[in-house]
Image: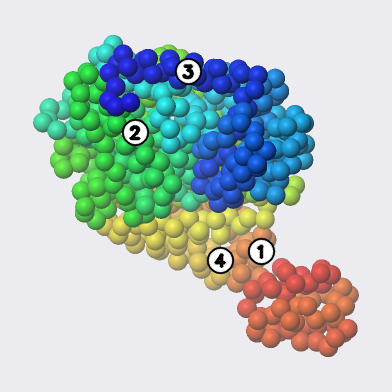
Amino acid sequence: MGKLTLEKLRALREALRREIHQRTTSDRSIQIAVGLGTCGIAAGAGNTLHALTEAIAARKLGNVSVRQAGCMGLCHSEPIVEIAVPGMPRVIYGGVQPADVDELVREHLVKRNPVARLVYESRPESADAGPDASFERFPNQFRIVLRNCGIIDPDKIDEYIARDGYCALEKVLFEMTPEQVLGELEKSGLRGRGGAGFPTARKWLFTKNVPADQKYIVCNADEGDPGAYMDRSTLEGDPHSVLEAMVIAGRTVGATKGFFYIRAEYPLAITRLETAISQARAYGLLGADILGSGFAFDIELRLGAGAFVCGEETALIASVEGKRGMPRPRPPFPAARGLWGKPTVINNVETLANIPVILLKGGEWFSRIGTATSKGTKVFALTGKINRSGLIEVPMGATLRKIIFDIGGGIRAGRAFKAAQTGGPSGGVIPPEFLDTPIDYENLGKIGSIMGSGGLIVMDDSDCMVDVAKFYLEFTVDESCGKCAPCRIGGRTLFNYLKKIAAGKAVPGDLDQMRDICQAMQRASLCGLGQTAANPVLSTLRYFADEYHEHIAEHKCHAGKCQSLLQYRIDPVKCVGCGACLRACPVNAIAGERKKTHVIDPAKCIRCGQCFAACKFGAVARA
C-alpha cells in the first residue's frame, strides 16, 4: 500500500474493520487462533498449527481461517487453540497436540460438537466484539497492556490497525499539543512499571523542558528477573503498541530517534519487533514526515548480552553506547543528560504499552482503575508452586489471595501456601498473613517487598527460606558489575554467610552481622541492584526467623533443601531388603543383603537423596 497519509490510514482502518466484521458475523466463517508465543512454541504449538492447517486442507474446509497469535497467558496449558464458530460459544482448548487435531477438526469444525476433554474454557460470545472487549476477556483480570495479546497476529500490522492501532498517534500528531499529552498522562497517574514507580508524566516533562539539539526515547526491554517474562510476551504478542507509544513520546518531548534495548536471549521478540518496525516504516508510521504531519521519528534495535545490571538506566545507556554496562552516579539523571549526553526518556515495555490506551480513552478513565496512589493495572508472570502459571493482568490493589487462588488455581498438589516473592532478586517474600494485602507500590513497601517489573513466584511448605535467600543472593552477586564496594563486597559476604547457615556452620551472632551488611548495602550502593539486593535476606529474616534459628541451633532444614543438614537413615521395620536404595547410591554408602535390612554409613553418605527417591516402601527417612 505504501506510505499512508492521515486520510489513507483512516480509510484503511475502516476497510479492515468492515472486513473483520463480515468475516466474524458470516454464517460460514470459522476463526482459529493458535498461541505462538515462546511458551507455546516450546510446548509444540508450531507442530499443532501445522497439523491443523493440513487437516483443514485435507477436508477442504474453505470456510476456516487459521492464524498465529501471541501468548494468551495460559502458559500452564500450552499449546492453546481458540476456535470461534458462528452461533456457538468461543472455545479455548488447552494442551492440544498434533495427535488431537483430527478429532478436533472432525468433532468441533464439522459436527459442531466441542471436544470436552480438551476444553480449557468456553465463552458465551462467538466473536470478539471489538477492541474494548479484550479489557475483561479473562475472569478476574482487566487487560490493558495485554489487550491484543493472543487476539491479533503480531506479524500483521493491519490487525493492530483494525483494533484502534495508531489512533492515539493520529490524535497526538493532529489534535493535541505536547502539553495536552502530558496533561492526560498526569491525570492518569501512570507510574513506571519497571520497578521504581516514578510518575511517567513527570519523567517526560523533565526531558521536554531541557533545551537540546537532539533527544532520545529508549524502551528498556532488558527484563532479567528470574521467572519474569512480561515484557517478552508483550513484545511477542503486540509489538506495535510499544512502537506507537515511542513515537508519541518522541513527539511529546521533541525527540526524533528511539532505541529498543532488548536482550539477545529473546529471539522471537526480536524477530517480531524487526517485522513490526519494517511494516511501520513501509506504512510511513516511522521515518520522515509521519502521516504527512512533518514530524520525523525512527527506531533502532540494540541487543543486550543479558547483564542484569543493564536494566538500570545509566548502565543501559552505557551499553547502548557500546561501553561496558556499569551504572554511574546520579544526578545528572538521564532525562537531562542521557544517551550520548543528550536528554533521554527511558521507559520499560509495560509502561509504554499503556500510553496509546490512556490517550484514546482519557487519563481520567485510567485513573479510575487501581488504588488512590497506584493507578491502572499490573502485569505479572505468575510462576512457582501454582496450579495455573501464566501471564496475567489485574487492577492495582488486587490481593495476593485473589491472584494465587482465584486466578492461579491455588497451590499445586494441595500443599500449603508459604510465601510469594515479588520484585525478583530485588524484592522480598510475602508470608501468609499478608495474603489479603492490596498489591500496590506503597503496600508492598510497607511489608518489605517491592513491585519490581512483575515477577511473582509462589512457594509452598516444601520450600526453605534460607535456600530461597541464598538463591537470590547468588544471582545478584553473579550479576553485580563490581563497580562499588558495598555491592561487590557486601553481596559476596552476605552470600557466604548464607552458605554457612545452609551448611550448619553458622553461629547466632552471624544474623546480626548480616543485618548490618544489609543496611550498609541499602545506604551506600551506587545503583538499585546493590541497594535492593539485601531485600530477600531482610524479608526472610523478618518473617521466617525460626527457620534461620533451626538451621543454626538445631542443624536442621525442615524443608529438606539444605543438603548438608540432611541425615538419611533406613527404618528397619519398613525395609524389605529390595536393594533399590543400594543400587541408586552413587558412593556405595549403603550395605545390606537381599531381603535383609539395609543400613547407611553416615561417614560415606553425600546426602544426594537418591536412596530416598528410589525407595518405594517409605523405608528411607530423612531428617
Q: CA distance from mark 3 to mark 4?
A: 61 Å
Q: Dot 1 surroundings within 10 Å: few (below 14), some, or many (20 or more)?
A: some
**Is 554 displayed left or right of 20 in the figure?**
right
Disc 4 is placed on an element classified as: helix
Q: Which mark is residue 560?
A: 1
**Is 122 displayed left or right of 32 in the figure?**
right
Which residue shows up at 78% across the image and 78% down it?
A: 580
Quadrant placement of the N terminus? top left
Q: Quadrant of residue 433?
A: top right
The mark lying in front, picked from 3 and 4, is: 3
Q: Position of residue 336 (x, y in %)?
A: 19, 34
Which residue shows up at 76% across the image and 87% down it?
A: 591
362 or 497: nearer the viewer: 362
Q: Position of residue 406 (x, y in %)?
A: 67, 33
Mark positioned earlier in the residue sequence (1 or 2): 2
According to the picture, the residue beneath numbered tag 4 turns out to be: 502
Mark positioned earlier in the residue sequence (1 or 3): 3
356 or 580: nearer the viewer: 356
The amino acid type of the residue labelled 4 equals Ala
Asked if 581 appears above or below 92 in the picture, the reply is below
According to the picture, the residue beneath numbered tag 3 turns out to be: 17
Mark positioned earlier in the residue sequence (2 or 4): 2
The amino acid type of the residue labelled 3 equals Arg
